[in-house]
């Protein structure tokens, strides 16, 4: 797989590389929705409190929105995005579980470094986003 630069000037090229590289790689390649749904979760600025860093795609001009990225993905792969809301919601729930695990390790004194003290407070953020994604599609 070729990885292109993720600087804002090459974002469309990067998206195209990802779309091309995913085609036919995994057993679920007929939909790609699980992997792409999770990518869109990390594309959402709501993940910033969980990740503890500035949100790269919203803090830097030139990146496409999640909807624009999804349109490009569908166009380049020729795949339908019918199940994408479900897999996007699943991605939010996965992130919440990961954040809760980090929070548990922090409370047990098993984290190294700074910035873990607020991860527990951020767990409801992806949960709400996942539920909101499901409600939008029902």
Image (spheres, helix red, strand yellow):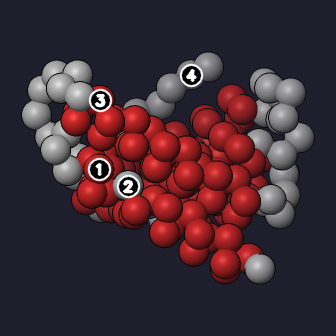
Residue annotated with mark 3: 105
Q: Secondary structure at mark 1?
A: helix
* Above or below: residue 43 compared with residue 23: below
- Tell me if mark 1 has few (under 14), some (14-19) or many (20+) residues whose alpha carbon lies within 10 angstroms of its own: some
- Disc nearer the start of the sequence (4/1): 4
- Tell me if mark 2 has few (under 14), some (14-19) or many (20+) residues whose alpha carbon lies within 10 angstroms of its own: many
Answer with the quarter of the image where residue 59 lies: bottom left
Q: Is residue 60 visible?
A: no
Residue annotated with mark 1: 120
- Disc nearer the start of the sequence (3/4): 4
> Residue 56 appears at what percent x and percent y?
31, 50
Q: Can you name the residue that lies furthest to the left here?
A: 114
Q: Is residue 12 left or right of residue 28?
A: left
> Spatial distance from mark 4 to mark 2, Cα to Cα?
34 Å
Q: Residue at x 80, y 59 (%)?
A: 83
Residue 123 bears which disc, if any? 2
> Residue 123 appears at what percent x and percent y?
38, 55
């Amino acid at each position: 797989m070729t990885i292109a630069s993720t600087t804002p000037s090459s974002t469309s090229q990067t998206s195209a590389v990802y779309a091309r590289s995913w085609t036919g790689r995994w057993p679920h390649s007929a939909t790609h929705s699980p992997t792409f749904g999770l990518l869109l979760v990390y594309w959402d600025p709501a993940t910033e409190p969980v990740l503890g860093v500035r949100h790269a795609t919203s803090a830097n001009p030139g990146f496409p929105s999640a909807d624009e990225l999804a349109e490009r993905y569908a166009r380049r792969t020729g795949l339908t995005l019918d199940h994408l809301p479900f897999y996007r919601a699943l991605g939010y729930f996965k992130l919440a579980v990961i954040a809760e695990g980090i929070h548990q390790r922090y409370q047990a004194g098993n984290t190294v470094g700074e910035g873990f003290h607020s991860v527990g407070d951020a767990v409801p953020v992806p949960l709400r986003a996942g539920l909101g994604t499901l409600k939008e599609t029902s």
